[in-house]
């Protein structure tokens, strides 16, 4: 008689390995009340037309309940991100623009609170958000400025600049986070844009006084 080990007992219960493309929908009480069920139903039904396998998972919570409904998206060649306030229209944009078009959506990404001080991978996206409490939102201006500077250096097709919904930074002026590394700068000024592109994006060096 073969003696079963703990590993033997746990093996049948282990979840199957997930494919490279998947979404997770937060289905906690707050998420459901905010409309997560409708967003999830759209993702489940309309993902069949994508042309590649997509696993749609219903999970208990993704945190960040202030931004319900929440959807986390993983797509090959793109950083994994969490989208907040995902209504029916946004769910369809996730399918069309993110999963098919390989483009992150503006105004919905809730950035990870896990920060890094190391540029351990080439930057493919920059999240930008004006966190100042003075009421004047400069997010769109800084998005435009970064895009224009990337164009001048021929990087516009390699790095997307995206307006974030929330960066987990508050009253720290303009903040940017580089994906997938999650290095985050705060109190960014217009005069810092060229330095960020040259030093951090091209030179792969951290600007310590902006961390």
Image: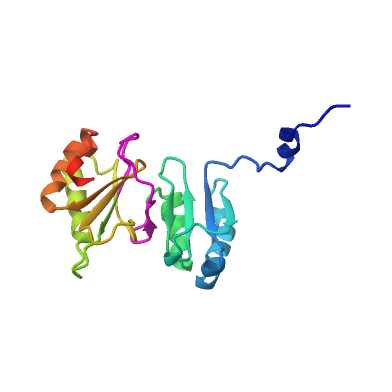
Q: Quadrant of the C terminus?
A: top left
- Report the residue at 52% width, 70% height from top: 35
Relative image position of residue 93 (x, y in whole percent): 43, 60
Q: Main secondary structure of the magenta part?
A: loop
Region in magenta:
104-126
Q: Relative to 122, say whether 75 is above or below.
A: below
Which residue is more in the foreground, 5 or 70?
Answer: 5
Q: Is residue 81 left or right of residue 16?
A: left
Q: Relative to 39, say whether 197 is above or below.
A: above
Whether residue 50 can be seen here? no
- Report the residue at 20% width, 70% height from top: 135
Relative image position of residue 82 (x, y in whole percent): 43, 54
Which residue is more in the foreground, 74 or 113?
Answer: 113
Q: Quadrant of the N terminus?
A: top right
Q: Relative to 92, say whether 12 is above or below.
A: above
Instruction: Indicate how the structure is coloured in the image.
Output: rainbow
- Report the residue at 46% width, 50% height from top: 99
Q: Residue 28's image quarter?
A: bottom right
Q: Is residue 41 left or right of residue 92?
A: right
Whether residue 142 can be seen here? yes
Residue 111 within the magenta-colored segment of the rendering: yes
Which residue is more in the foreground, 163 or 113?
Answer: 113
Residue 140 within the magenta-colored segment of the rendering: no
């Amino acid at each position: 008689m073969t003696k079963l080990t703990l590993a033997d007992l746990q093996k049948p219960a282990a979840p199957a390995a997930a494919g490279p493309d998947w979404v997770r929908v937060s289905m906690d009480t707050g998420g459901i009340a905010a409309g997560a069920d409708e967003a999830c139903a759209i993702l489940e039904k309309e993902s069949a037309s994508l042309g590649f396998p997509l696993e749609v998972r219903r999970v208990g919570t993704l945190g960040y309940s202030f931004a319900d409904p929440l959807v986390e998206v993983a797509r090959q060649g793109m950083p994994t991100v969490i989208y907040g306030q995902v209504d029916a229209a946004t769910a369809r944009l996730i399918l069309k623009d993110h999963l098919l078009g390989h483009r992150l959506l503006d105004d919905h990404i809730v950035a990870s609170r896990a920060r890094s001080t190391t540029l351990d991978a080439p930057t493919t996206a920059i999240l930008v958000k004006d966190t100042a409490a003075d009421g004047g939102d400069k997010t769109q201006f800084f998005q435009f400025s970064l895009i224009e500077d990337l164009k001048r250096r021929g990087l516009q097709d390699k790095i997307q600049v995206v307006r974030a919904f929330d960066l987990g930074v508050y009253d720290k002026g303009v903040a940017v986070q580089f994906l997938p590394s999650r290095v985050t700068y705060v109190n960014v000024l217009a005069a810092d844009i060229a330095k960020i592109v040259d030093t951090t994006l091209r030179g792969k060096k951290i600007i310590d006084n902006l961390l």
